[in-house]
Amino acid sequence: MVTNMEDFNTVKKVYFLGIGGIGVSALASMFLHENKAVFGSDTASSEIIEELRKTGANVFIGQDLEHIPDDTDLVIYSIALDIFAPEFMKEVREKIKNVISYPEALSIISKNKFTIAISGTHGKTTTTAMVAKILIDAGMDPTVIVGSILKDVKSNFIAGKSKYLVVEACEYCRSFLKINPTVVGITTIDDDHLDYYKDSADIILAFKEFALKTPKEGAVVGNLNDEKIKEAVNVSVSKIINSEDFFDINLPLKVPGVHIKKDASVALAIADFIGIPKDVALKSIKEFSGTWRRFEYKGETSKGTIVYDDYGHHPAEIKATIQGTREAFPDSKIIVIFQPHLFSRTKSLLSDFQKAFDNADKTILLPIYPAREEFDPTIASDDIVTENSKNIEMAKDFIDAAKKAFEYGNKGDVILVMGAGDVYEVTNLLLSQK
């Protein structure tokens, strides 16, 4: 952290590198809410960037040192830039005195708050949103920073006036260790981000370090029937709460799937710890309708095929979402359009990807979305297809994928558009097909 900043009270002009990122953009919204001058840049425009522009942010496309005003008080950047643009970041630090990463900014924000930090390989976004809704419905006026768009407020940031901060805590590059939590929720621990973590033991160690950050008067919440979570949380000096004590397989929710009920159990356990009445928490959870790109209903095609969009990009998430769709639509064909995210993830989890689509009736694979990575010729989407694969085919691009899915689906069938890249654009193509 290239600053001795204790808070952001003296900041008048701030620049965000990677402003279109779901976490960084939430902080940009926070600074806009505080009437600070917000500038930023990213590699491409997006709906999130357009919304920031509407609320007063000055956003450039393309990362250029010249875009950063000389009188900028603070630069906040996505940690991906440290990895993939180190020379550029060196120039930024030479130009501007105060330069901090997104996780370091969360450290400052969370320092003097009752911080509820939700972590986990899968489910953290949904659980963060659930906890936020419970606190809001209970009149506790929290500040919220979440890695998706909350449907009720159409934002990934809520400016609260109370002591409570609800924040999504990402494990990538051990980012969450910068947060100062009072309560830690852990939804799942699974193999992911193996471009950074050495192995499963290294991932568990990171969650142990996170659990250790909770104070004695705080709490760590997770499913203690899960051996990985149990190993991670048992090091904590704070209260350890088993979320399985709050799990109800018959809990009626608007979003389908056992995995969503597991997320709800973590949210309900946290609500119980902070003293929210059970009936208030349950009512809130039952009314929860999901978040942007988490089994999000997008409409129907001209043939009557139902279209959902989902951020799922890990094999475990894909399997859980398909299973949840089966529960909600037991008599329908399920068609999946999937865009793998990252060459490294596809390669390291290839055997799991090869089994992830077994419960779908049809799977259409798109080329790998590289995101922050350079092209890797040793791995491709068609490596997911094996001789045992069930009804999987390749599509060359979004138009081809939409055409194939549209032709296969009939009235009442379901198309799941899945992936963490820009695959959500396929939904508009599907809904405009004739």
Image: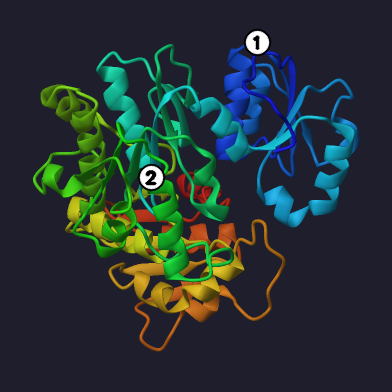
The percent position of residue 225, horizontal first and vertical second, equals 18, 59
Height in image: 290 above or below 140? below
Residue that badge 1 annotates: 35
Residue 302 % position (x, y): 40, 46
Asked which colour scheme the image uses, the reply is rainbow
Quadrant of res 240? top left
Left/right placement of residue 286 relative to residue 211 reads left
The residue at 19%/23% (across/down) is: 275
The residue under label 1 is which amino acid type? Answer: Asn
Residue 214 lies in quadrant: top left
**Residue 373 point in image, percent of width and height:** 68, 62
Residue at 52% x, 62% y is: 193
Q: Earlier in the sequence, mark 1 or mark 2?
A: 1
Q: Is residue 179 left or right of residue 7?
A: left
Which residue is rendered at x = 38% and y = 55% of the image?
416
| SS label for mark 2 | helix
Which quadrant of the figure has residue 400? bottom right
Q: Which mark is residue 124?
A: 2
Looking at the figure, which quarter contains the N terminus? top right
**In the image: residue 5, left or right of residue 195:** right
The three-letter code of the residue at mark 2 reads Lys
Residue 171 at least partly seen: yes
In the picture, the disc for residue 199 is none
Report the front residue among 112 and 60.
Answer: 112
Q: Is residue 51 visible?
A: no
- How many C-alpha atoms fall within 10 Å of the one at disc 1: few (<14), some, or many (≥20)? few
Which residue ends up furthest to the left in the rendered image? 250
Q: Residue at x 75, y 36 (%)?
A: 2
- Label 2 environment density (alpha carbons within 10 Å; few <14, some 14–19, many ≥20): many
- Say what secondary structure mark 1 lies in: loop
Q: Which residue is more in the foreground, 89 or 383?
A: 89
**Distance between mark 1 and mark 2 Cα atoms:** 30 Å
